[in-house]
Amino acid sequence: MLTLAIFGALIFLLLINVPVVVAIGLTSVVFFIGLGDARLLAMLPHRMYYGTTGFTLLAIPFFILAGNLMNTGGITDRIFRFAQSMVGHIAGGIGQVNIVASVIFSGMSGSAVADAAGLGQIEHKAMVDQGYDPADSATLVAASSVIGPVIPPSIPFVLYGSITSVSVARLFLAGFIPGMMMALGMMIALGILAKRKNYPRAEHKESFKARLSAFNGAFWPLMAPVIIVGGIMSGFFTPTEASVVVCVYAAMLGFFYKDLKLKEIPGIVYKSITQSVSLLFIISSANFFGWLIIHQKLPDSIIETLVGYGATQSIVMWIVIGIVLTMGLFLEGNAIFLITLPLFMPIATMFDIDLVNFGVVMVLLIMIGNLTPPVGMCLFAVDSYAKVGMPALAKRVWPYLLMIFLITVLIAFVPSISLFLPNLIMGEM
């Protein structure tokens, strides 16, 4: 009953449009007072401060900055041109280019919204110019952008690792295959839709010379994920240090290509700071909420209930999937992480669910939330420039959502898919 009361109060505050950070903090304060533990409120500043001081969390502001530098520095144009030379001739044409470009860009930014807001504008305009319906184009941009946080580097994986103490390097590796499966699933869905709607594509494959030229133009941007992942795997730097390296690398490329001007740097930094502060403020508030959950031993009572009803690992996983998908309708992804993980982690451990695979499943579920109205962050990001309206986006996004959901279920119940690379490269835990 206490669990239902706490989460019921939180959901009620969110439904009446109380800001997420305020709703989380207010729920914690009210329940500590109501439970007769008001003296523990003295711990509020300490817990909020402690929640943002983890070394791993330093990666988040730098990955945000890297994404903003790449969007401003013209790197996205070169990535798009290379993707166009490779897949512009298959069914779906420029739409398939969109998906491949998102896969490449995801190896640098780690943020779905950064992909949707930056590279997405180039992709949307190119598709509309070649005859795509604006709503179809915007929907595909939003859907392909959620590949970003699954393929490393990934801000959600960094956040998950900081909360759970799971190796971020293992999480990065575990995201590769699911991310590629997402891209392939979207390409299949698009191919079917494109044939039905007769969308244009390039008449011929580009010549080897043209592809080589496009590759040369995008070579140094393409090297970014190789440097990041290679450096982490070789032990040359940590995931946190990798975030700084990619920022420096993105700035160097911007200046080298003469697309990034020195006068633009203060604006990019300021934008990155505001985005980082917004996220870190939620993290700090959620840390106090997580402390409330642990202090009241809510996971213990839920575990006792599940065991008493004879729940199995599969049943627990279905329960998690249902809860996160429901919360994704109303909450931003990072907030879902911070609210649910203190509750889910002891349960996952008790039922012997691999925590690396669990992290991949959680990120995939949150990506679905980014595409589901009424609070689909990627849909809002795309509609800010596409101007086609949320109803049109919500109506057309379902084929891509279905593909992601099927892949999520497969990863959830066949952990060997996501664990193959981390076990191969880093050894089994």
Image (spheres, rainbow, N blue to C red):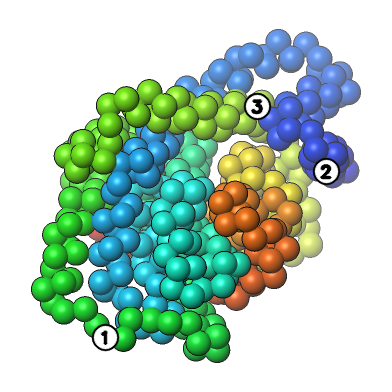
Q: Which of 407 and 109 is in front in this view?
A: 109
Identify the element where label 3 is drawn: helix
Q: Mark 2 points at which residue?
A: 15
What secondary structure is marked by label 2?
A: helix
> Closer to the N terminus: mark 3 or mark 1?
1
Which of the two marks, 3 or 1, is nearer to us in this view?
1
Instruction: Name the front one of labels 3 and 2.
Output: 2
Report which residue position mark 1 lands on.
204
Residue 335: x and y in percent read 63, 40
Going 16% across and 72% down the picture, which residue do you hit? 210
Q: In which quarter of the image is the N terminus?
A: top right
In the image, residue 317 above or below residue 277: below
- From the image, state whether disc 2 or disc 1 is nearer to you: 1
Q: What's the amino acid at mark 2?
A: Leu
Q: Name the residue under label 3.
A: 285
> Is residue 75 placed above or below 31 in the rendered structure?
below
Is 413 in front, or is 245?
Answer: 245
Residue 161: image quadrant is top left
Q: What residue type is labelled 1?
A: His
